Image (cartoon, rainbow, N blue to C red):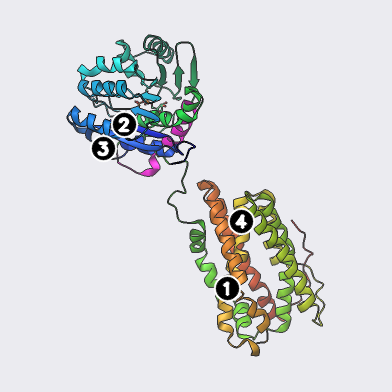
Amino acid sequence: MSGRGPSRVRALSVAGTDPTGGAGVQADLKSFAAHGAYGMAVVTALVAQNTHGVRAVHVPDVAFLRAQLDAVGDDVTVDAVKLGMLGTRDVVEEVAAWLRRTRPPVVVLDPVMVATSGDRLLDAGAEQAVRALVARADLVTPNLPELGVLLDERRAPSWAAAVDQARRLARSAGVTVLLKGGHLDDDVSPDAVVDARTVVELEAVRVSTTSTHGTGCSLSAAVAALRPRRPDWVSAARDAKEWLTGAIAAGEALQVGSGRGPVDHLHHVPTLGARAFSVEAWDAVADLRAACDALPFVRALADGTLPTDAFEAYLHQDALYLGVYARVLARASELAPDPVAQAFFARGAAGCLDVEAQLHRDRLGRSDRVHRSGASVVTRAYVDHLAAVGAHGSYAQVLAAVLPCYWLYADVGARILARAGDLAAHPFGDWVGTYGDPGFAALADEARRLTDEAAREVGAGERARMLAAFVTSCEHEVAFFDQVAVRAAHGEVDLRSAVPVTAG
Ligand SMILES: Nc1ncnc2c1ncn2[C@@H]1O[C@H](COP(=O)(O)OP(=O)(O)O)[C@@H](O)[C@H]1O
Ligand SMILES: Cc1ncc(COP(=O)(O)O)c(N)n1
């Protein structure tokens, strides 16, 4: 074991079940995980319920509850416990006895009494025992009706009256109260952290949704998981509530059940379980890849029938392109989050400039044609796209935009090489031979790995922008190959109308 303490908060839920996963221990475990805690659960009651309501409740013998609590307590240090549905007076008293034996440093009590569906989850005769348990907790999280019951008063008629009740409960029980405003008839859904001296309101808009099943469970579990790593209840509750509001807003998209649905506990990590960005992106450009192979230029380059003029015009555009591409790779290096990526793209930028210089010196320099024209409209369109993403896009977007030049190019090149046959007899054999360079394939692999790594850090919107940048670059790649062949077919390959390239 490491001497630096546990890597995660060890959080325990003591609650009932919900087989549809929206409330009870199932929700608590998701909530713990969503906040980086290691989750554990002791079941107080088995509840046959779904998003419409509760069908049956089975409360096992309390001796079995004790056995579960002791099994955890005898072996595992619990950093925080969240108490949810307790159901009967016997269960409440058993849990109170356990707290007397082993008291974890953080105890959050959600005084579950009635489900969102209106079904009772606590025997009427157990209310007094729950009142006594409140004094054993550090934080109690009642909704409006539960707060009234805990004080043996009527449900507060207004938010101000509820805050007043919460203050009185905090004083009488020596506990901090997280008062929940979900039951207010209002277009906001505030909560408040109330102790004997202070009231801190946590504001939130009310989300218009049917996905409110298990909100109370999820919130109290989140606060329990966060508290060991926050300086006070207010900061733990504020972070938990902000997360919950997002989880409620994302709930309907889960399409779980036809009643009051659950919240999306993992809404803030939408890429969990998603396919790697590169796999999704590659599928998205399947048609473009097929189109690329079918281009007259690509076929003529592979079989050696491409006119030399056309080949040189292509190389000339390639050299102009690489000059700007190098700048965008340098931008990726500038934005890179770590030295590995930073060095990779810096080397990539330098490598492009070397290739560009070599093209002019060795291939175009030997040519008896003088390539003075600037970048074609097609070349400019591609580099303008790259430069725009470089200027305004995030690191992840820049990587998605530069990836096709590595990957699509290596992919098309491999098939050109395969079709070219005997390179010694091929008019562009030395050039086509470079498509088989294992060094370039390795660079393409690394660029793809870094792009996937960047994609894992981003949300759904940013990932969609990455995909758009990638697809656009692929479209430009295809147009880039196609530009010379079309002109060659018309017998004009020197691109006289081109305008000089402007670097990004
Ligand atoms: N429609 C909603 N929009 C935003 N927040 C909500 C909504 N409904 C409930 N909440 C929040 O969910 C949490 C649980 O609230 P509440 O419904 O009062 O408790 P319970 O689920 O125990 O009945 C609170 O933070 C509350 O503010
Ligand atoms: C096992 C269990 N515990 C608690 C609730 C309350 O859920 P809600 O937050 O919807 O009131 C529930 N429905 N089931």
Looking at the rendered structure, the secondary structure element under dot 1 is helix
Q: Residue at x 66, y 84 (%)?
A: 429
Tell me if 112 is positioned left or right of 355 in this view: left
Q: Distance between the residues labelled 2 and 4?
A: 49 Å
Q: Give the camera-side residue of 414 and 257.
A: 414
Question: Magenta includes 16?
Answer: no
Looking at the rendered structure, the secondary structure element under dot 4 is helix
Disc 3 residue type (three-letter): Asn
| Residue range highlighted in magenta | 237-258
Tell me if 68 is positioned left or right of 137 in this view: left
Q: Is residue 359 above or below residue 303?
A: above
Q: Distance between the residues labelled 3 and 4?
A: 44 Å
Q: How far apart are marks 4 and 1 (CA)?
A: 20 Å
The disc, 4 or 1, on the residue closer to the chain's N-terminal end is: 4
Q: Is residue 424 above or below residue 250?
A: below
Query: Could you say which quadrant of the image residue 468 lies in?
Result: bottom right
The residue that mark 1 highlights is 412
Q: What number is the disc on residue 50? A: 3
Overall secondary structure of the magenta section = helix
Circle 1 Cα neighbour tier, 10 Å, few/some/many (<14 / 14–19 / ≥20): some
**Label pair 3/1, CB-CB below 8 angstroms:** no
Disc 4 residue type (three-letter): Leu
Instruction: Look at the image and tell me whether residue 263 can be seen.
Output: no
The residue that mark 2 highlights is 73
Q: Residue 472: x and y, percent?
A: 60, 60
Q: How far apart are marks 2 and 1 (CA)?
A: 61 Å
Q: How far apart are marks 2 and 3 (CA)?
A: 31 Å
Disc 1 residue type (three-letter): Val
> Of discs 3 and 4, which sits in the foreground?
4
The residue that mark 4 highlights is 399
